[in-house]
Amino acid sequence: MKIFNTLSRQKEEFVPLEEGKVRMYVCGPTVYNLIHIGNARPMIIFDTVRRYFAYKGFAVDYVSNFTDVDDKIIAKANEEGVSSEEISERYIAECKKDMEGLNVLPASVHPRATEEIDGMIHMIDALIDKGFAYRADDGTVYYRTRQFKDYGKLSHKNIDDLEAGHRDINVTGELKEDPLDFVLWKPKKEGEPYWESPWSEGRPGWHIECSVMSKRYLGDQIDIHAGGEDLIFPHHENEIAQSEAANGVPFANYWMHNAFLNIDHKKMSKSLGNFFTVRDISEKYDLQVLRFFMLSAHYRSPLNFSDELMEAAKSGLERITTCAEKMRFVGKQAAADAMTQEEEALYAQTDRFVAKFEEAMEDDFNTADAIAAVFELVRFINQNIEGATRTFAEQLYDRLHTLCEVLGIVIEKEEELLDDAIEALIEERQQARKDKNFARADEIRDQLLQQGIQLKDTREGVQWTRV
Ligand code: AMP
Ligand code: ZN
């Protein structure tokens, strides 16, 4: 499997730190507003990367944080006259709703910066001990950038050029030893949330959060660190400086960055005001369409959002779901069960679409080509499905289903999902009765009735009908 590594600016063969395992950290959003569809791009892309690793049999530890302390959160809290926690709680919940709609799997852990302050103080302390950080008189702690010899290795910037750039910036009032130094800890201002620390009552800088959360949940060394390309500098460069200086080992082996989602060929961003939230899009489209749209381009290519492309994604997706529906229908109507010899031969031919799909994904997660392979499979199925036996229809369905699942595209019909949910509730009700928890059993029966499902207890078991 090849991954384009921002560190080397090359595609490299993926070799995990530990066989069969992937440790992956993806920088998550700052939660002060509904996420926009630009923020959704890394979520969808790296969720797909994760799904592909899982499909290949890797155990994936996937960590993605919420930055829940930040100037913008504080500003929003002041604007509304509520606490910062109220703002971050609200938008974490909203973000999770959007992720669910986009079929982005929950991370193994979603750490929140405010719950990891001890770890941050600990790492800052270690950096001070090692001479990589210092406290200024006002209680700010800075990272001593020049002390880290590899500074610039990710963004391929030369530290002397950076210094020249920084000289133009007015840094009066800051007590830095060097304009390149960046903040690890900053003292509170009036009315801001703060934590006790050895240096001042204050809060951590943004970069230290990710170094600490990654270390805590994944260890000193990880396989993949990812985010949007705007994070390469300074955020990820600074994370490397912090983590490698503190831990004494290379931080992440592969750095992956998605290109921007643009609108009118400009980066979609909250500050420019040229954005659509995921919620806006959900009013017009099923969010599956948005996911499919994002995957229709390579993640390292800029993608321009437009109605035409969304419509194209919608009809592409429909081609797949219509095929799936037809297969289900044919499977149910089939006169014969077992595959014919001819069907066995046809089925074997579908290996090549799977191979093509995998080849595309192994080439730095080329989802555009992977989707092309799915379309080829759909075409093949459409040509061969008439009069299929039940097994043939089911096996073709499984093939399509497996590939779509890697992409996070759902092809089951909603009604069938619903059926599964009903069965699960019925099972839970049976268990509740066995446990003599009749209150819960009745609650489930009433809940189902409200959703138009009537249960009938018969000697053969529980039967249900839609009423
Ligand atoms: P933020 O909340 O701004 O820190 O962003 C959260 C994630 O979304 C980061 O990985 C950003 O790089 C990414 N991101 C923000 N805007 C865009 C965009 N227009 N296109 C792609 N990724 C973006
Ligand atoms: Zn980060």
Image: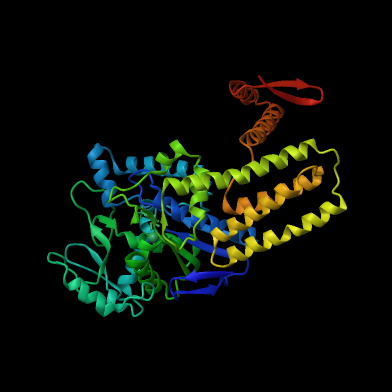
Q: Quadrant of residue 170?
A: bottom left
Q: Position of residue 87 (x, y in %)?
A: 33, 41
Image quarter for ligand 2 equals bottom left
The image shows residue 159, relative to residue 375, as above or below, that is: below
Residue 37 seen in the figure:
yes
Q: Position of residue 382 (x, y in %)?
A: 70, 47
Q: Quadrant of residue 238?
A: bottom left
Q: Quadrant of residue 438?
A: top right
Q: Across the whole image, how many numbered discs are drawn on residues?
A: 0
Residue 168 shown left or right of residue 37 in the figure: left
Residue at image x 25%, y 80%? 160
The image shows residue 71, relative to residue 156, as above or below, that is: above
Quarter of the image with the C terminus in it: top right
Q: Nearer the viewer, residue 228 or 152?
A: 228
Quarter of the image with the N terminus in it: bottom right
Residue at image x 38%, y 47%? 36
Q: Position of residue 169 (x, y in %)?
A: 17, 68
Residue at image x 37%, y 40%? 90
Q: Position of residue 450 (x, y in %)?
A: 58, 21
Residue 194 seen in the figure:
no
Q: How is the image coloured?
A: rainbow
The image shows residue 383, relative to residue 59, as above or below, that is: above
Q: Nearer the viewer, residue 68 or 228?
A: 228
